[in-house]
Amino acid sequence: MSVDANQIATKGDLESLLQKLEQRLSGAQPTAPATGDDYLSIDQVAELTGFNRKTVKKWIDEGKYSQQGKLIKLFTLEFAPGFPRIPRSALVAFGKGVGFDVGQLNAPPGLRLAS
């Protein structure tokens, strides 16, 4: 299997992608509702960020590297197996390239940790 050198992402490509994601998420800053976080489906995250569903699944399954070189994954919760939900605050943290602290999440009862 040969790899075309033009298909390998450079540091500049990744920085540009991160900047684009941060710009798209800047308007998605949560307002900290009293009842808890806002939970988004994979399709809603894809629509909100402008990336496709496959990319969002990759963020959940494989993660991305922060600017400090630490691997971070998009945090999800599951209502039922196969139905992940992403807290809006976790999406914002992921877009900023920082890990999400689950201790700050006000999760409704009955949700289980997926990642």
Image: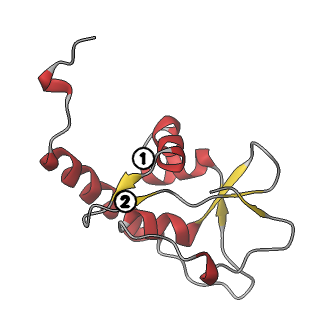
- In terms of secondary structure, where does tag 1 sit? loop
In the image, is 84 to the left or to the right of 65? right
Q: Which residue is mark 2?
A: 24
Q: How many marks?
A: 2
The reply to whether dot 2 and dot 1 touch (C-beta < 8 Å) is yes
Q: Earlier in the sequence, mark 2 or mark 1?
A: 2
Residue 31, above or below 112: below
Residue found at x 75% / y 42%: 82
The picture quadrant where one finds residue 105 is bottom right
Residue closer to the observer: 4 or 28: 4
Q: Residue at x 53, y 38 (%)?
A: 53
- Residue 55 position within the rendered picture, expressed as x and y whole percent measured from the top left: 45, 40
* Image-quadrant location for residue 114: bottom right
Residue 22: image quadrant is bottom left
**Colour scheme:** secondary structure
Residue type, mark 2 in image = Arg
Helix, strand or loop at mark 2: helix
Query: Which residue sits at x=22%, y=13%?
Result: 2
The answer to whether residue 97 is above or below residue 47 is below
Would you name the residue on which mark 1 appears? 50
Horizontally, residue 27 falls left or right of residue 87, namely left
What is the C-alpha distance between the residues marked 2 and 1? Answer: 8 Å
